[in-house]
Image (cartoon, grey):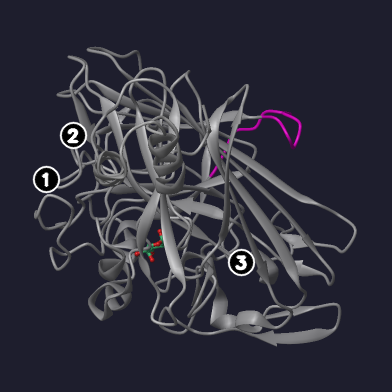
Amino acid sequence: MPLINTQVDAQRHSVGSTLLLSAAIALLMFSAAQAQSETEATAGNGAGNGVEKSVFGHLPDGRQVDVYQFTNANGIELRVTNYGGIILSLKTPNVDGEFDDIALGFDSLEAYLSDEYRQANPYFGALIGRYGNRIAGGQFSLNGESYSLATNDGSNHLHGGDQGFDKVLWQAEPFESEAGTGLVLRYTSEDGEEGYPGRLETEVTYTLTDNDELMVDYRAVTDKATPINLTQHSYFNLKGEGSDTILDHQLMINAPGFTPVNDTLIPSGELRSVDGTPFDFTQLTLIGERIEQDNEQLAYGGGYDHNFVLDRDNAAADELVLAAKVWEPASGRMVEITTTEPAIQFYSGNFLNGDLTGKQGQTYGHRSGFALETQHYPDSPNQEAFPSTILEPGDTYRSRTVYRFSAQPNVDS
Ligand code: GLA
């Protein structure tokens, strides 16, 4: 069985098996196979492992964009496009075995390319780079040189700039390994792109395992020292995308501290304990429980939009530690996130305002999805005390984050 069930493969198979039949019958089967393959690429939860590839659309310059669909042994279905490495949908079962798509996003490439979307810029499901999160004033110095980046978030640089890794076409290669099936995405960011130094060769691998995990592996090399902070910007609503708010989800973040910010969401440099604050998620707590409290940090973020410093407890730098866990009581769905990163940004979807319409025709309202972005701290290139985000030539950037999906009626805090 070929790994990718492309239209071409489907045609070959169909024509091959009808060699002795008349040309007319072959032609009929040919069209049938083509039609079936096209439907398969957008169908619901199929059983069994596999990868299916189909055309998602074309960029204004004519380049083709594809979508890859993966299904694991338990019917979990993941759809990813090589435009921005965007996770388009993720269908997982609730406690009764009913599947829903829990990832916010769209069904068409046009929706991701639209002016409306680019203005709102929520980065639904996308790979973020070269530097996830903010760099103050879009400025930093490295090895005696000053660099200026786009200021695309007020006075700051956000998520890689005007055309970050979320808005470029990645080269994609599906694979099957012992761990599962998945997609390797490669993108080379040229020296000077978006103002960053060095030609950065980036590789991100999505693996969907039969253990109901989505593994994301990041790797990069550069020819000049450069800041790098790659992450994944999926928004989930565990009741199903297009449902109302995520305020009824319970969240645990394995973080004793967070980095308080100023009113433009740049860290002050302080590492503050979460103790006695609305930022204490060390036990499962309703996201909505304290979000409206009168608190300066919550006011700056319009809710949660903060970098939580994980308890890595002497773990080696390449060791996965539990970063966060989210459980939604009605569906029983849970996602557990482990990572090699030192921190995680918890963003409670505060900028969503109902302007964007999702896959089921429902609008994405205020706080109708949450993002948990594993990462290094924001503004690290300007903050000496923060763990370094500088990748040197000759070194390899490596990072891994694993999302494990399950469903259970109850959960321990
Ligand atoms: C990150 C940021 C938020 C917001 C979202 C995208 O999570 O921290 O402030 O920009 O991305 O809307």
Instruction: Looking at this view, name the residue that lies furthest to the right.
Output: 394
Could you classify mark 3 by the number of other residues whose Cα lies within 10 Å: few (under 14), some (14-19), or many (20 or more)? many
Q: Earlier in the sequence, mark 3 or mark 1?
A: 3
Secondary structure of the residue carrying tag 1 is: loop
Which stretch did the figure color magenta?
309-319
Q: Does 408 appear above or below 258?
A: above
What residue sits right under mark 3 in the picture?
130
Mark 2 belongs to which amino acid?
A: Lys
* Residue in view at x 38 percent, y 62 percent: 123
Mark 3 to mark 1 CA distance (whole Å): 32 Å
Residue 356 image point, x, y percent: 17, 65
Q: Does 50 appear above or below 380?
A: above
Q: Quadrant of residue 46?
A: top left
Any part of residue 185 in sight: yes
What residue sits right under mark 2 in the picture?
239
Any part of residue 139 in sight: no
Q: Quadrant of ligand 1?
A: bottom left
Does the magenta-highlighted stretch encompass residue 326?
A: no
Q: Does 27 appear above or below 319?
A: below
Secondary structure of the residue carrying tag 2 is: loop
Secondary structure of the residue carrying tag 3 is: loop
